[in-house]
Amino acid sequence: MMRLTSQWVILRVRRYWLGRNPLRRRSDRLEAAGVVVTLVLLLLSVWPAVVVGRLVYERGLRAERAVPGGCRPVTATLVRDAPDTVPAGGGQNGVKPESHAPARWRAPSGEQKTGQVAVPAGTRAGTAVRVWIDGRGELTRPPASHTGTLAGSATAAFLVVAGSAATLTSAFRVFRWSLDRGRYAAWDASWAEACARWRRRKPDG
């Protein structure tokens, strides 16, 4: 595999190397220049990717520190077994499917609250689960985790680079396609000229 990869790289370098080969056409040099420009722009796209990743990371840090409405974790107790059955496609890759079941917890005011919480399918009544509630004791989303912040920033940076690579590759293919059209036209014209010259030189029979 490594040998094939190295051979592919060597062939591409030889193809686009801007040497003084007299057989190189103007279109070949333009294509090589297009490769250089594409690679330079791709390298430059790393900078905006870093900027975007940094912005997403800082926003994630602010979300981690902000705990809206007195959000806090509490322990809830299931009051009924969670269903064993789940929609088709659940529980793939060895992960136990998720279900919902009613649970009871105590609000900051001391009032008992009840609501549907997400638990693994088949969880039995009486099981203690951790939930997040707001200042009124209602269920709410947990604050952002640092792992999620890191994953989000890395994903954002990757998407910028991937999007730039896809755009630049598409633009280069269109550019090369236009060069190929010119090459094919020049090739046809050369063949037509050669055929005409050959017919003029052919002795009468």
Image (cartoon, rainbow, N blue to C red):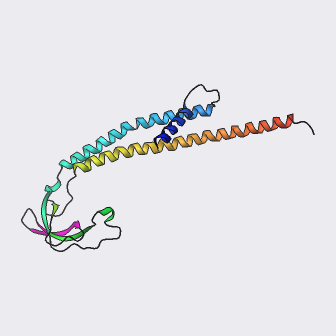
150 is within the stretch colored magenta: no
Q: Which residue is at the front of the view, 78 or 205?
A: 205
Residue at x 22% of width, y 45% of height? 61
Q: Is residue 13 shown above or below 56? A: above
Residue at x 17% of width, y 54% of height? 68
Q: Position of residue 110 (x, y in %)?
A: 6, 65
Q: Is residue 136 visible?
A: no
Q: For this view, does 108 lie left or right of residue 123?
A: left
Q: Position of residue 197 (x, y in %)?
A: 82, 34
Q: For this view, does 62 lie left or right of residue 27?
A: left
Among the 4 quarters of the image, the one containing residue 157: top left
Among the 4 quarters of the image, the one containing residue 126: bottom left
**Magenta-tinted stretch:** 104-126
Residue at x 23% of width, y 67% of height? 120
Please state, as top left, top right, bottom left or bottom right, where the C terminus lies in the image.
Answer: top right
Q: Is residue 37 visible?
A: yes
**Callout count:** 0
Q: For this view, does 52 lie left or right of residue 196?
A: left
Residue at x 15% of width, y 56% of height? 69
120 is within the stretch colored magenta: yes
Q: Position of residue 50 (x, y in %)?
A: 33, 39
Residue, far right = 205
Among the 4 quarters of the image, the one containing residue 183: top right
Q: For this view, does 48 lie left or right of residue 98?
A: right
Q: Position of residue 27 (x, y in %)?
A: 61, 34
Q: Which residue is at the front of the view, 78 or 164?
A: 78
